[in-house]
Image (tube, rainbow, N blue to C red):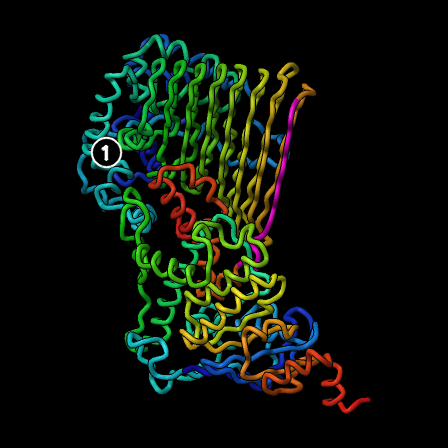
Amino acid sequence: MARLELSNLHAEVADGDEKILEGVNLEVESGEIHALMGPNGSGKSTTAKVIAGHPAYEVTEGEVLIHLEEGEFGEDIEIDEDQRTWNLLELEPNERAALGVFLGFQYPAEIDGVTMTNFLRTALNAKIEEREELFEDEESEEEEADEGFETSPMEGPADEGEVGVAEFQQILQEKMEQLDMDEKFAQRYLNAGFSGGEKKQNEVLQAAILEPSIAVLDEIDSGLDIDRLQDVSNGINALRDEQGTGILQITHYQRILDYVEPDHVHVMLDGQIAKSGGPELAEELEDKGYDWVRDEVYGTA
Amino acid sequence: MSSDQDHLKETDTEARFEFKKEENSAVRSDKGLTEEVIRMISEDKDEPDWMLERRLRALKQYQNMPMPTDWPGQPDLTELDIEEIVPYIRPDVDKREGVDDWTELPDEIKDTFDKLGIPEAEKNALSGVGAQYESEVVYQNMQEQWEEKGVVFMNMDRAVKEHPELVKEYFMTTCVPPSDNKFAALHGAVWSGGSFVYVPEDVTVEMPVQAYFRMNSEGMGQFEHTLIVAEEGSEVHYIEGCSAPKYGTHNLHSGCVEVFVGEDAHVQYSTVQNWSKNTFNLNTKRAICEENATMEWVSGSMGSKATMLYPCTILKGRGSTDTHITIAFAGEGQNIDTGAKVYHNAPDTSSTIESKSISKDGGRTNYRGLVHIADGAENSSTAVECDALMFDNESTSDTMPYMEIEESKVDVAHEATVGKIGDEDIFYLQSRGLDDDDAKKMIVAGFIEPITEELPIEYAVELNRLIELEMEGSLG
């Protein structure tokens, strides 16, 4: 079980003074599904990016904490009492990833020339390695000398990392089958030439492989046709049901919530969470739009 | 010469080349380019008179040609003083069989080999200080296989003696005559070492011909000559594996490559070169394609202070084809000026140029290309694509694609992209667990993938590693 906690989070654009988040409070636990809804420009995507550590935003106030429990990352990693709570704002994006935070992008980058297989295995191994470093006993923490590569270039690439090529192939194949993805996917270049739907599916695949404690999915439903929406939703439900991932689902629309049923729904307005409730709140929003929330909160008529 | 002067000369040279052991060189010429120096080189190689004459003729041409200085955006060559360069050093081969010398290598080179993960024996071979024996055995085994088919693959110096007719006909005659440019003339005068490859009619050499051996036996050759003659219907892939950093810190590398691609023949020339950062790398590489011949250039240019290199193909025969795939990397203080030249001199010819460059820390890369389609070269087509990737705002990249099209029935395409490594791309990879450095490495590895894809795995891996090391700034 892990818990992501945003408290009084204020943030602005790093190279300007445009305030975007004005005191966000939110808690997401492993195994829960939260929907974060709200009109365009209300700060939903910024919230996601700030959690993941995007350099374009500067946090001016507040905290983003992650609380971990013993056994969070399996038996290999022991988590001391004083290492159970981490302030994400002090960490690099890759360190946040290592602590189990995943951001599903609305517009994922396209990296040409890098195959999905290569990328995902590198990411998985990087995460495992980073985790070991973060939880390493501080006394034994010594700067490791760069010893170079273990094999000769004449022998081809070294099989570096915890998860080897063969083992990874198996993991990947399994996850792709679960998500009903074509096996050709594995040899395609990361997001390059992917359709909108394929990109979203790929984001869910990555979450399935990296097994985060908390996944923030930024408008993963946008641009999906109904079939693909179902595939993606099944993937998200599997994250929660099989890996116990806590999901923060950012969306404009009720539509995806028909498939991914949230435990909690939050409405964001002007950089704050204006109202929270159960699944029924999403339906209400569907019927009535966002203005009534605004009226209710600000008391305007 | 008095002994005092001798001493001076020694010290000078030692400083210049950072030789760790003076006995590493058995014969060393005087500085500068004089007739005496050329005669001394030729004599030391025990060359026939005709080669000496060619050298001397090239020297005259060299002396009468100006340095190129006024190309737009060309690398600054003012620091290059050819009169201060020792054009010929023959290493003492006997001394180099011992591997003990490894410890005597400059630290930066040892460090590089370590980081490349090259085992001790191989390091010694690559650094030119030992393990020559192993390479020699490999080389001879392969040679026997080839000899049965009539293939010749040997050191260029040896070819002058053993295949004088072929060398007389092809060596710096119609492909790259010394009059071609200042550095071709220089090369013609002081050339030493290199490879000679001859493939008879209809013979396919299945395995790539690799020139690793040459580095072992020549070690310090800075003016190596590569001559490839592929007769009608033959096929060969020649790979120059100068991928390890050069031993020593020479000032000038001016190699020359000449390729003759016969009718229906297919030649691929691949090279991954990494020069020390104070090297001026000024080369001439050219291929001539007969009817329906195919020439492919695949090259990775790394290191050097300044590189000027534009592999050239002359599509002389109808239906001949050329492909260029090049990559350049420029870091701090480096100017890599590279590209491609193609002359479409016959109908139905086609060419493809794919050029990639990476610059960081104020490094500068230029793409300089020339595609010439002659009047009458109907139905010819060319596609040029150059992509530049920059790490930061200090680095620069220029694209100078010249197109000279004299024929109207042709298909010409040019596409260029220049971009900075995107923050969003890096963030995406970071959010998946890669640190900043690894994210950049992955983006660059993807960027150069079209080139690594064309290379045998060991070269691809080395190219990737060299680029990773460059990105870490770990190479001297």
Q: Is residue A163 left or right of residue B448?
A: left
The front one of B65 and B365 is B365
- Residue B205 on image: x %, y %: 32, 23
Q: Circle 1 marks a residue in which chain?
A: B
Residue at figure coordinates x 20%, y 26% from the top left: B141
The front one of B110 and B401 is B401
Q: Is residue B415 magenta?
A: yes
- Residue B189 on image: x %, y %: 42, 18
The front one of B124 and B247 is B124
From this view, report whether residue B436 is shown above or below residue B347: below
The quarter holding residue A79 reads bottom left
Question: Would you name the residue on which mark 1 appears?
Answer: B23
- Residue B246 on image: x %, y %: 35, 38
From this view, report whether residue B171 is shown above or below residue B461: above
Amino acid on which the number 1 mark rests in the picture: Glu
Which residues are drawn in magenta?
B410-425
Residue at figure coordinates x 28%, y 15% from the top left: B150
SS type, badge 1: helix
Q: Is residue B216 left or right of residue A180?
A: left
From this view, report whether residue A116 is shown above or below residue B415: below
Can you say which quadrant of the picture contains the N terminus of chain B? top left
Taken as a whole, is the magenta stretch helix, strand or loop?
Answer: strand
